Amino acid sequence: MFRKKDLLIIIPFLVAAGILALWFGAKPSYGIAVVEKDGKEVCRFDLSKQKTSRIIDIGGSMNIKLLLEPGAISFYRSDCPDQTCVRTGRLTKPGQAAVCLPGKVSVRVISDGNSVRKYDGYTG
């Protein structure tokens, strides 16, 4: 079916495609963490500029604390009954979000505007 000459043409193209995919696809897409309490923005953190881990005290009736790490943010502690916000885990990519409904606190990661991709995907 394939001859040796066919493979000599196909293999370099596959290698080049693999190198390009690794080169352009391996860039981390950090974002900006936006923290809102009672529907109002409390603070923003640029996840790409974080060098150390620290705990941010949001307070409120549920005594909420956030863990800010290099490249990630998460709910660290909350006095809410179900702990869904804490179990959500680390938010690292633009578009991810976590909410503590009883405490009325939300954390979402938005794009920093420097991302390579403008869209998540293309359709027909």
Image: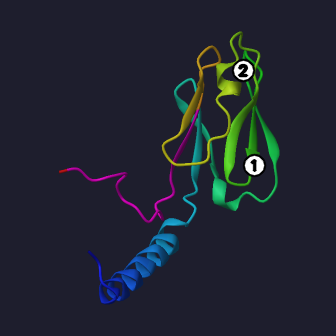
Bounds of the magenta span? 107-123
Pair 2/1: label in front: 1
Could you tell me which quadrant the N terminus lies in? bottom left
Residue sitting at 17 percent across and 51 percent down?
124
- For disc 2, the marked residue is 60
Residue 100 picture location, percent across and down? 62, 22
Element under disc 1: strand
Nearer-the-camera pick, 34 or 29: 29
In depth, the one of 20 and 44 nearer the eye is 20
Amino acid type of the residue tagged 1 in the rendering: Glu
Residue nearer the viewer, 66 or 84: 84
- Which residue: 71% across, 9% down? 81
In the rendered view, tell whether residue 3 sits above or below residue 101.
below
Counting every numbered tag in the picture gives 2
Judge whether 86 appears above or below 74 on screen: above
Q: Give the label on residue 69, or none.
A: 1
Judge the density around disc 2: few (<14), some (14-19), many (≥20) Cα neighbours within 10 Å.
some
Residue in the picture at 73% in, 15% down: 61
Which mark sits nearer the N-terminus, 2 or 1? 2
Q: In this view, does 32 lie above or below 13?
A: above
State left or right for residue 19 relative to residue 99. left
Residue visible at 51% across and 57% down?
A: 112
The Cα–Cα distance between marks 2 and 1, rounded to whole angstroms, is 22 Å
Q: In this view, does 28 lie to the left or right of 24?
A: right
Secondary structure character of the magenta stretch overall: loop
The question of residue 20 being in magenta is answered with no
- 109 within the magenta span: yes
Q: Quadrant of residue 10?
A: bottom left
Q: Position of residue 77 (x, y in %)?
A: 78, 26
